[in-house]
C-alpha cells in the first residue's frame, strides 16, 4: 500500500481544468491499492479518487476497466463511476502515467466480516454478475488455470524455502485443475478480487464495491469461490460455515446457481485458493530491496487450500441441500 | 511517508463515539507525515484528520502540540484545530497509540514556491510568532545547537562515506556555532519545520499551516532562517534573492526584526542548514532494511550551508538595507 508517483498541485490543477468538476481544494495520496497510486481529491464541487495506473497495469486493459465501472454503475451497481472530461474522454495522462478520475464512494471496509456482511456481499456479487450482462468489451482472466503453471515456474526451486513440501502440493493441484477444470458453466464479467477491503459498508449495509482491476470474463461460480476464500475463513484458519451459508444464500437469492455450478464449487474453491497462494508466493519471493509494499502471507492460502482438499461437497460450505 | 499503524473501521467507529462529530462515513490512511500515521476521516458532519502518534513522538510533548494548535487557532492562525471529546479531553488512544483528531484544512502545498508564495509565508510566519504569545506550556528545542553534536556523533565515522570532507565541514560549523550562537534575541514559540509541504495555499493565497510536531520555544529569527533555507533555494541549489526578499519583507510587514536579529541572520541560516544536514545525515545512514520511508538527501543542505558560509550580511538574503 503506497503512493508510487508524486503529483504536484500545479500539475493536478492543470489536469483538472479538462474536467467540469470545479477547482482543486485539497488532495492526499492514500495508502491503498497495491497496484496503483491513488489520491483523494477534493474540489470545489465534491470528492473524487484520482488513480494513476502504474506499470503492473497494462494500458490496453484500461478501456475495459473504465468501461466496466461505467456499465455497472449505469446498471445499478454502487461502484466508482469514471468521470468524463469535457471532451467526453475518461482516460488522461498525469505525471507520465495513464490516469482516471472516479467518483468517491462513502463507506468503510470491514476487517472481520460478520455473517450478515457475508450475506450482503453474496447478494452484491450476484447483482454484479447480472449487471455485467451486455458489457461489450471482454478481458480474459490471465490468472485462471492456464496462468498458474507459469507462476509456479516463476517461484521455482525456492518454493519449498517458504514451506517444506509446498512444491509437491502445488504440483498435485496444478495437475488436477489442468485436467479437470470446469468449462461449461455460466460465465460473464467477474470481479475476481472481491476481498473485504474491496467492499464498503455504511451502518452495516453494503454501500459499494471498488477496485475492478482484476475484473475479467470467467465463470461466475469461480468468483463465488474467490469470495468464500476471502470472506468466510477466520483469522485462525478455520472455515466458518455460518458465513459460508450466508454468502451462498445471499448469492442464490439474486442469482440461483445451476446444479453443475454447485457441484463444481469445491474444485473452484481449491483453484481460487491456489491462485492466491501462487501470486502471493511469487510476490513473497520477489520483494525488491527497500520495498514500499509488504507482501501478504502465502501460507494463509495454503491452509485454505488444505481445507478445500478435504471438502466432500458444496454442503461443507454451508449450502442448503 | 507512510501509514505505520493499521486502524480497523470497527475500532475507529468505537473511538468516534467519544466525540460529538457524527458517525464514520469513510477513512483513508494518507501518505503524509514522516513521524506519525495520519488518516483522513469523513463523518456524517465533516472531514477530519486523525493522527496516531508513533514512537518518534514523546507522549510527554503531546499536551504542548495539542495545546499550541488550540492556542494558535484561538488567536487567528489558520491551523488544524484539535477536536475535544464530549468529556473535554483532546488526547485519546487508538490501536495502542496516543492519538488526536483535528479539523481538516483545505488547501494544497506548493512544490515550487513563487516569490508571492514566499511573501505570504513570511507574513504567516510572523503572525504565528505573534500569536504564540501567552501560550503557557513550553518546550525546549531539542534540535538547537546543543543537540547538533550528539547527532554528528550518531553519524560517526561513516559521515565521509556520504560526501568526502563532510566531517571536517561539520566539525568547523559545530565549533563556530557552539562558541557564538546568539542568545539574547527575541524568542517565543516557533514552528521550526515550516517547509513548503507544511503550508497550504488555495488559489495562491496561503490557507493554513500544518504539522506542529517540531514546534518549540526558540529564537524567532531562527525560524525565519529555517524558512529561508526551505523556501528560497532553487532545485539547482541556487539561492533566489527575489524569494528571500519577498519572504523577509512579508515577515517584517507583520513583525519588524530588531537590528540584532538582522545581523544574526547569516549565522542562524548556517545553523538551520546544519540542523537539517545533520538530521538528514543520521536518517540517511540509518535506513532500516525494508524501510517504508525514503530518506531525504542530506547533501541538499550541504549546498545550502556552503551558500550561507559565503554570505556577508543579511542583505545577501534580499533584506532591504
Image (cartoon, coloured by chain):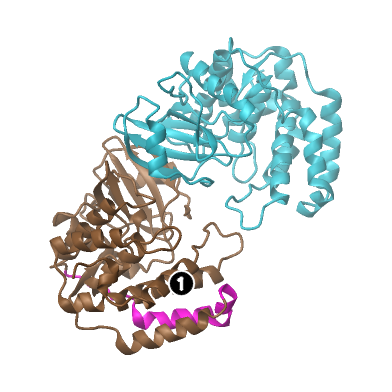
Chain colours: A brown, B cyan
- Closest to the observer, B263 or A248: A248
- Closest to the observer, A83 or B118: A83
Q: Is residue B83 above or below residue A9?
A: above
Chain label for disc 1: A
Instruction: Name which residue lies at 14% across and 55% down.
Output: A74
Across and down, in percent, residue B17 comes to 37, 30
Label 1 CA crowd tier, 10 Å (few <14, some 14–19, many 20+):
many
Asked whether, in this view, residue A254 is left or right of residue A176, the answer is left
Name the image quarter holding residue B126: top right
Instruction: Name which residue lies at 74% across and 32% down.
Output: B270
Instruction: Name which residue lies at 58% across and 22% down.
Output: B63
Q: What is the count of numbered marks?
A: 1
Q: Is residue A146 magenta?
A: yes
Across and down, in percent, residue A146 comes to 36, 83
Q: Is residue A67 magenta?
A: no
Secondary structure that dominates the magenta span: helix
- Closest to the observer, B129 or A180: A180
Name the image quarter holding residue B49: top left
Across and down, in percent, residue B271 comes to 74, 31
Q: Is residue B85 above or below residue A229?
A: above
The local secondary structure at tag 1 comes to: helix
The C terminus of chain A, quarter of image: bottom left
Instruction: Name which residue lies at 43% across and 36% down.
Output: B108
Which residue is labeled 1 in the image? A302
Across and down, in percent, residue A246 comes to 24, 58
Q: Is residue B232 visible?
A: no
Q: Is residue B102 visible?
A: yes
> Which portion, as a residue range, is magenta?
A136-163
Considering every residue shown, the one lying at the far top of the view is B134
Amino acid at each position: 500500500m503506497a503512493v508510487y508517483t508524486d503529483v504536484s498541485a500545479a500539475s493536478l490543477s492543470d489536469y483538472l481544468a479538462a474536467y467540469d468538476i470545479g477547482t482543486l481544494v485539497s488532495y492526499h495520496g492514500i495508502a491503498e491499492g497495491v497496484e496503483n497510486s491513488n489520491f483523494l481529491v477534493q474540489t470545489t464541487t465534491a470528492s473524487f479518487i484520482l488513480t494513476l495506473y502504474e506499470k503492473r497495469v497494462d494500458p490496453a486493459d484500461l478501456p475495459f476497466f473504465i468501461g466496466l465501472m461505467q456499465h455497472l454503475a449505469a446498471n445499478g451497481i454502487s461502484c466508482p463511476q469514471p468521470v468524463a472530461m469535457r471532451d467526453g474522454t475518461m482516460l488522461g495522462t498525469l505525471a507520465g502515467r495513464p490516469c482516471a478520475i472516479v467518483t468517491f464512494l462513502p463507506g468503510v471496509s470491514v476487517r472481520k466480516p460478520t455473517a450478515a456482511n457475508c450475506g450482503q456481499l453474496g447478494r452484491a456479487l450476484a447483482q454484479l454478475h447480472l449487471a455485467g450482462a451486455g458489457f461489450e468489451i471482454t478481458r480474459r482472466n490471465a490468472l485462471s488455470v492456464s496462468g498458474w503453471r507459469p507462476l509456479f515456474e516463476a517461484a521455482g526451486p525456492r518454493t519449498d524455502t517458504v514451506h517444506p513440501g509446498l512444491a509437491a502440493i502445488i504440483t498435485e493441484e496444478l495437475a488436477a485443475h489442468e485436467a479437470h477444470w470446469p468449462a461449461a458453466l455460466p460465465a460473464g464479467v467477474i470481479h475476481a478480487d472481491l476481498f473485504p477491503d474491496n467492499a464498503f459498508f455504511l451502518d452495516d449495509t453494503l454501500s459499494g464495491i471498488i477496485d475492478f482491476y482484476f475484473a475479467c470474463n470467467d465463470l461466475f461460480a469461480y468468483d463465488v469461490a474467490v469470495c468464500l476464500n476471502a470472506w468466510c475463513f477466520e483469522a485462525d484458519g478455520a472455515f466458518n460455515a455460518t458465513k459460508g451459508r450466508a454468502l451462498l444464500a445471499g448469492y442464490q437469492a439474486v442469482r440461483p446457481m445451476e446444479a453443475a455450478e454447485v457441484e463444481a464449487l469445491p474444485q473452484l474453491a481449491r483453484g481460487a485458493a491456489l491462485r492466491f497462494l501462487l501470486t502471493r508466493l511469487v510476490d513473497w519471493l520477489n520483494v525488491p530491496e527497500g520495498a514500499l509494499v509488504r507482501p501478504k502471507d502465502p501460507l494463509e492460502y495454503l491452509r485454505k487450500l488444505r481445507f478445500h482438499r478435504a471438502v466432500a461437497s458444496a454442503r461443507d460450505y454451508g449450502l442448503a441441500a
